[in-house]
Amino acid sequence: MSVMSLVSYEEALASYDPVMGLEVHVELGTKTKMFCGCSTELGAEPNAQTCPTCLGLPGSLPVVNAVGVESAIRIGLALNCEIAEWCRFARKNYFYPDMPKNFQTSQYDEPIAFNGYLDVQLEDGEVFRVQIERAHMEEDTGKSTHVGGATGRIHGAEYSLLDYNRAGIPLIEIVTKPIEGAGHRAPEVAKAYVAELRELIKALGVSEARMDKGQMRCDVNLSLRPHGTETFGTRSETKNVNSLRSVERAARFEIQRHATVLGDGGTIVQETRHFHEEDGSTTAGRIKDNAEDYRYFPEPDLVPVAPAREWVEELRAALPELPRVRRARLQAEWGLSDQDMQSVLNAGAVEPISETIAAGAPADQARKWWMGELARRANETGTELSEQPITPAQVARVCALVAEGKLNDKLARQVIEGVLAGEGEPDEVVAKRGLAVVSDDSALGAAVDQAIADNPDVAAKIRDGKVQAVGALVGAVMKTTRGQADAARVKDLILEKLA
């Protein structure tokens, strides 16, 4: 079904209420895998980081990664969950080749954390509470590369390559309860939830949560029900969505697709779907299995996990400052109004600004560049602000060059342009492009004399005491020097000559 053939978003919401469920998988940043001692470092040769345990060879036995368990508990606590006094792992059986042992070690009906919530702030400042069903431990699967087909999917491929380096990497799956009542804001809620969850995970230090690297992935479950009814509709599950913008687009597309199918008298199929970045559409994957199809049963080779209550409370007491609390503190420190802080949040600029300040820039200057020039460029390219090819340290250096009088704002914009274009560090761009401010009196004198000669009427006004007219002559000098003159020094020189 093409994007063009769908009913409009407004038409869809006129007849139906969306119900969402979000499943987020987070790869933990442990040094070794969840049940063996293999390295989790990225970039190794395919299948180099494997052993008899993660390959499921006979006679091998798993051992639980203690750091993985601790990370799971910390995530659960940060999500206001109850932490199980006793839980265990289960085998999730299936026949896909991305796990060589033909099952995934996961948790089924006994998760380590359950019954929590996360408050998320929408773009207008409204706070929406997302209820958390569970957060459970499991292992990641291997990577399949399908070769020879037109789409990169298994259908039509000539053959498939399997890399088991990722098989066994610790995962935490965080599952929401059905998200109801969001109405037309459902896609925005989905994006805001994943964004807040990503910031929370990063604050805990348990994962870098890089969606572009697959360290955090979201499955978007969605169904529609007619207004005034309580029964949930049949859901679809858009798998492995890997950016905040794509989470929002996937939810919006599925709302329109479901409404189109139902409006035409069709039936929604419970299935997985693939999201396509190029046009924001989804296409069918496979019929979605139910829990009984996975034939869960308790993992016989692992003992149950029973976190001591004292340990859980120690972990609770050691939690870092969580994102919402930190944002409130930063707002006060930066002296921003609620509206200004909301703009910073909506732009995804909290971390870039904070890190730029940490690198030595004043708060107002850091905010100025990230919310101005860099936000404009992010909008032009349709990318996240944090994805711009410039670091907070580089922005702080630009601020320092301006403060030192070596750059003015116009030249600073050109320096940022050069850094974004890959021309090097700010100082290198200044040197290569010859962008330093000219403040030497001998270099400016000729330009000042020429401006006075070219504008005798303005010069006469200044001599008569109308000092405000000096701006016209400063502008003429700036034009002659292509914006590189020190405007303050130019003004002083003009007034000295015309005094």
Image (cartoon, grey):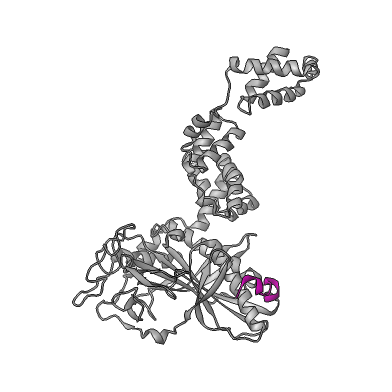
Residue at 50 percent of width and 34 percent of height: 429
The residue lying toward the viewer, choosing from 51 and 223, is 51
Q: Position of residue 386 (x, y in %)?
A: 51, 51
Residue at 39 percent of width and 72 percent of height: 158
Answer with left or right where residue 120 lies relative to residue 5.
left
- Highlighted magenta segment, given as a residue range: 1-12
Q: Position of residue 476 (x, y in %)?
A: 71, 24
Quarter of the figure with residue 34: bottom left
Instruction: Assess whether residue 298 is covered by the magenta stretch.
Output: no
- Give the quarter of the figure containing the N terminus: bottom right
Q: Is residue 8 above or below residue 314?
A: below
Answer with left or right where residue 173 lies relative to residue 445.
left
- Give the quarter of the figure containing the C terminus: top right
Q: Is residue 454 visible?
A: yes
The residue lying toward the viewer, choosing from 293 and 35, is 293
Residue at 59 percent of width and 86 percent of height: 267
Q: Is residue 362 visible?
A: no
Answer with left or right where residue 319 lies relative to residue 38.
right
